Image (spheres, helix red, strand yellow):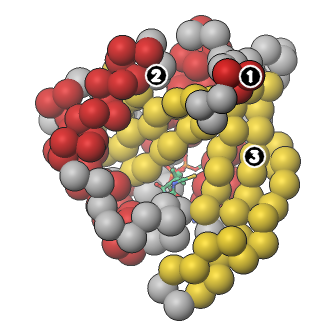
Amino acid sequence: MLARIRPARIEDAAAIAAIYAHHVRHGTASFDEVPRSLAETEAKIAECEAQGWPFLVAEHGQDLVGYSYAMRFRDRAAYAFTCENAIYLHPDWLGRGIGTLLLCELVACARSCGFRQMIAVIGGAGPASAALHAKCGFREAGRLKAVGYKFGRWLDTIYMQIALDAPEA
Ligand SMILES: CC(C)(COP(=O)(O)OP(=O)(O)OC[C@H]1O[C@@H](n2cnc3c(N)ncnc32)[C@H](O)[C@@H]1OP(=O)(O)O)[C@@H](O)C(=O)NCCC(=O)NCCS
């Protein structure tokens, strides 16, 4: 089996924080420049659990090789049915289909918990992320040009969107 997808537990926080830290330090998918602490990562898992929002991990054997989660897109009341996703893989496990497994399951879980739209905010307009989201049924909804600056470069952000209440989701 490629990987087993299961809900995240608080004990997964260290492995999740390490994956995110790698992408903060070396990539442009996240516009953070300082990795999230263990406590902040635990708080995110706990918030998803408390709200009933999906936070998933991919496991290969004993190793946690990736994660994805969905949270409200914005706090304001009318956005209550729209979520934003996040998905990050361990650098040794890129390009092997695990992102597809995590995102397809996340879409299904987000639909089950009552969200009607999911937005991917693709920092740095990363081609792998755009390809993954397109493969899972997302369509481009807009591009913000040069809104990020990291590693000495101006970066675009692409918004992609999927309607969770549509048959193709
Ligand atoms: C984006 C990411 C989650 C994708 O997960 P993954 O497991 O590598 O993706 P998959 O192997 O499931 O591939 C999904 C599709 O994307 C395509 N793809 C993967 N890597 C690619 C790359 N570097 N360039 C272009 N397309 C790519 C694959 O070809 C595949 O499409 P196909 O099946 O039609 O060939 C992963 O690469 C990652 O963690 N990247 C760094 C962090 C990031 O960008 N996160 C997204 C934040 S919005």
| Residue 36 percent coordinates (x, y) | 29, 54
| Near-viewer residue (94 or 160) | 160
- The image shows residue 84, relative to residue 48, as above or below, that is below
Q: Earlier in the sequence, mark 2 or mark 3?
A: 2
Q: Residues within 10 Å of mark 3 (few under 14, many from 20)?
A: many
Cα separation, mark 3 vs mark 1, equals: 20 Å
Mark 2 closeness class: few <14, some 14–19, many ≥20 residues within 10 Å: many
- Mark 1: amino acid: Ala
Q: Which mark is residue 9?
A: none
Instruction: Identify the element where label 3 is drawn.
Output: strand
- Mark 2 sits on what residue? 54
Q: Secondary structure at mark 2?
A: loop
Tell me if residue 97 can be seen.
yes
Mark 1 falls on what kind of element? helix
In this view, 86 is above or below 23: above
Residue hosting label 3: 160
At x 57% / y 10%, what residue is drawn?
A: 113
Q: Measuring from the top left, give residue 34's x and y in whole percent.
A: 32, 67
